[in-house]
Amino acid sequence: MRNLDEHNITAEAHRRIAATPDARLHQIMRSLIQHLHDFAREVKLTEAEWFAGIEYLTKTGQMCNEVRQEFVLLSDTLGLSQLVVAQSHSRAAGMTEQTVFGPFHVEGVPTLIEPGSDIARGTQGEALYVSARVSSGDAPVEGALVDVWHADAEGHYDTQDADWAVERSRLRAVFKTDAEGRFSFWSILPKSYPIPTDGPVGTMMRATKQSPMRPAHIHFRVRKPGFDTLVTHVFADGDPYLDSDVVFGVRSSCIGTYERLSPGTAPDGTRIDRHFYALDFSFALEPDPAG
Ligand SMILES: [Fe+2]
């Protein structure tokens, strides 16, 4: 077919993928073409704007490396990540809800640290003791693997350090729940922080006058065969950014109390001679619908 114009080119693009053997791929490609073409027609996209878009996506890709995922950040800040999470994990009342994974998780943190370990590893901040419990229904979940990761008091993740290597990880660890479904650790109090704004996502935030702030939180991923893997955060109750999280991630069931305590004996018996914080949180897992 030749002499295509802005009105009949969509049908021709659909015709060319009609023989796609994978039905799901065909559905996704067909819809993507339809929405892309409709978008260009609706805003009457100019050639200069089309090329600016190409350059923007190119820069976004060039910003990505092993530990920096600008495309995830772009998806997060456009609300796409949370949309996909929300439609993939509906939760019954009482279950801990799913939130965005974010770009700062690292696979392969080597050590399964003992309960009560300090994951700050020298990072400055206000001491925080976290004790948590994983259950499903009334039963504790023993042997679940719990990935924990969070930013320091300045809002930086260790992977943003110039000399970061997995063996120099800090503020991240993997724990295993005990027979009562419990795990615990020491760290420092997380603070609200801006997402990285030195790349294309920052350019978009400034151009659209959006705040780059996220409310203070710790990330958790809880896994055990037979349960739907829980990827969530525990946000700090009272944080001023709970209702304006730049990545749309806050759920009411994921807000915890980071309680400020006086010097004395911590919940694990540790003597502490300065103010510190304690978070006690329960995660409720949903059985995997696929078994
Ligand atoms: Fe985070």
Image (tube, helix red, strand yellow):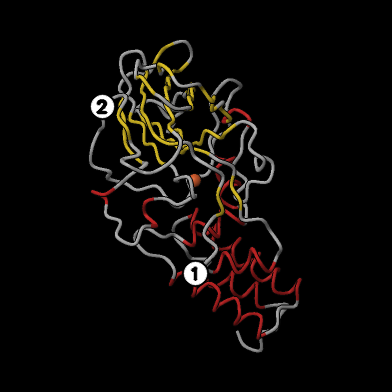
Considering every residue shown, the one lying at the far front of the view is: 273
Q: Where in the figure is residue 95, as x and y percent of width and height?
A: 54, 23
Please report the residue visible at 49 percent of the width from the left and 69 percent of the height from the top.
Answer: 60
Q: Residue furthest top?
A: 138
Q: Quadrant of the N terminus?
A: bottom right
Front: mark 2 or 1 = 2
Q: Position of residue 231 (x, y in %)?
A: 46, 37
Camera-nearest residue between 242 and 10 = 242
The picture quadrant where one finds residue 207 is: bottom right
- The residue depicted at 66 percent of the width and 85 percent of the height is 47
Q: Describe residue 78's horizontal placement relative to residue 142 as left or right.
A: right
Identify which residue is drawn at 59% across, 53% down: 80
Q: Amino acid at mark 1?
A: Thr
Amino acid type, residue under disc 2 in the picture: Glu
Report helix, strand or loop for mark 2.
Answer: loop
* Tally of marks: 2
* Mark found first going from the N terminus, 2 or 1: 1
Q: Under tag 1, what secondary structure?
A: helix
Q: Which mark is residue 114?
A: 2
Residue beneath the point at 31% across and 18% down: 178
13 sits to left or right of 158: right
Residue 215 vertical placement versus 29 (above, below): above
Corner quadrant of residue 253: top right
Q: Quadrant of residue 260?
A: top right
- Look at the numbered discs 2 and 1 and tell me whether their residues touch, using CB distance below 8 Å: no
Placement of the C terminus among the 4 image quadrants: top left
Judge the density around disc 2: few (<14), some (14-19), many (≥20) Cα neighbours within 10 Å.
Answer: some
Mark number, residue 4:
none
Residue that badge 1 annotates: 60
Front residue of this view, candidates 89 and 155 = 155
